[in-house]
Image: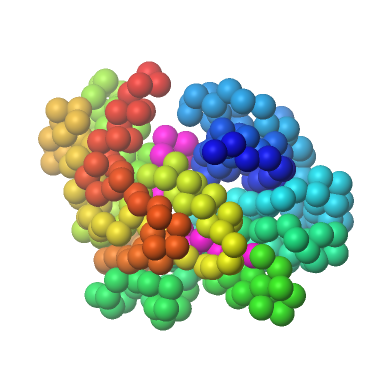
Amino acid sequence: MTQTGKVLIIGVSGQDGSYLAKILCNLGYRVYGTSRNPAQATIGQNFNAIQFRQKVTILALNPEDSEAVYHIINDLQPNYIFNMSGQTSVGNSFKDEHATYQSIVPVVENILNAIEETNSSIKFLNAGSGEMFDASSNQDITEDSKIKPLSPYAEAKFEAFNMIKNFRNKKKIFAVTPILFNHESILRPNHFVSMKIITSAYQILNGQLEYMEIGNISIERDWGWAPEYADAMVRLITQDDPQDCIIASGQTISLQCFIETVFSELNLNYHNHIKINRSLFRSNEAMRISTNPYKIMKLTSWKPSIKGPKLGKHLINEYLSLK
């Protein structure tokens, strides 16, 4: 169904921002997207990769600048704001804790304050992370699971999550957190393990690489398909009642299974082409993370379809289609 209105996507140049722009434009919204440096961002490259040709107005914005955030929200008066900006790598967050924090917590505060000061009817969604939960038990993670952030990234996401709850409860602003678990696509940079596996397998197939170095392949994760998660976020922000929800596939597989699936699609035996590098193991890393996304499915009728081994097949085949 075609919609009307304006949407502001803060951080449109990344994976989630790109897919959100495509979905929202197809629904009929006027979409504005921001980037810290549009001239150097991969916006056009990403839009081309996902065959997205519609018009998005791109604006330069440093979301850590509270005055700049205020002015862009006041000038545009969007119906919806999606914040997809910020440092997204757990590993990199240990290298620069301050930059990670600054890219997440003050940005959310700037947006919430601007909404309160300019138009409290604006609906706001901020990308959260399943990294904030305690994954040490064998129980499926739900919205009520114990919180135990183990990285600077997770700590910052948890602080932003609480800030949104406080604004929602005290200021009556429509603000929600989709608590996102691993979701992948061909738009992921190569420092994410999913794309490292995809690109390495392709290079091995073509004789450009002898083997892939990888960390602990016994870990188990809930991996999903990013375009479906973007759809879930649109459904969540367009609800009448603001609710924080886990967005996940509900199916857990090992990294070994993911690797085997990708290599098998290329008729490669992964055993012959990987080397385990213990320096790539993370300390305090949870061995298994499983989820129960029942709430988002019940609330919005969303249902993920590309998950488990099917995700690896989908990723490598979409990657090959671009070659």
Residue toward you, 245 or 139:
245
Question: For this view, does 17 lie left or right of residue 266?
Answer: right
Report x, y in % for residue 235: 51, 52
The residue positioned 45% from the left and 57% from the top of the image is 300
Q: Is residue 102 above or below residue 73?
A: below
Q: Is residue 234 visible?
A: yes
Q: Quadrant of residue 160?
A: bottom right
Q: State which quarter of the image contains the C terminus.
A: top left
Residue 33 falls within the magenta-colored stretch? no
Residue toward you, 144 or 256:
144
Residue toward you, 279 or 2:
2
Question: For this view, does 168 lie left or right of residue 89?
Answer: right
The residue positioned 30% from the left and 59% from the top of the image is 250
Q: Is residue 182 above or below residue 39?
A: below
Name the image colouring: rainbow
Residue toward you, 142 or 84:
142
Q: Quadrant of residue 5?
A: top right
The residue range painted magenta reads 175-189
Report x, y in % for residue 21: 59, 38
Q: Is residue 156 above or below residue 144?
A: above
Q: Quadrant of residue 76?
A: top right
Report x, y in % for residue 189: 47, 40
Question: For this view, does 145 lie left or right of residue 106?
Answer: left
Residue 183 falls within the magenta-colored stretch? yes
Q: Is residue 99 visible?
A: no
Q: Is residue 92 above or below residue 264?
A: below
The residue positioned 68% from the left and 52% from the top of the image is 81
The residue positioned 35% from the left and 32% from the top of the image is 199
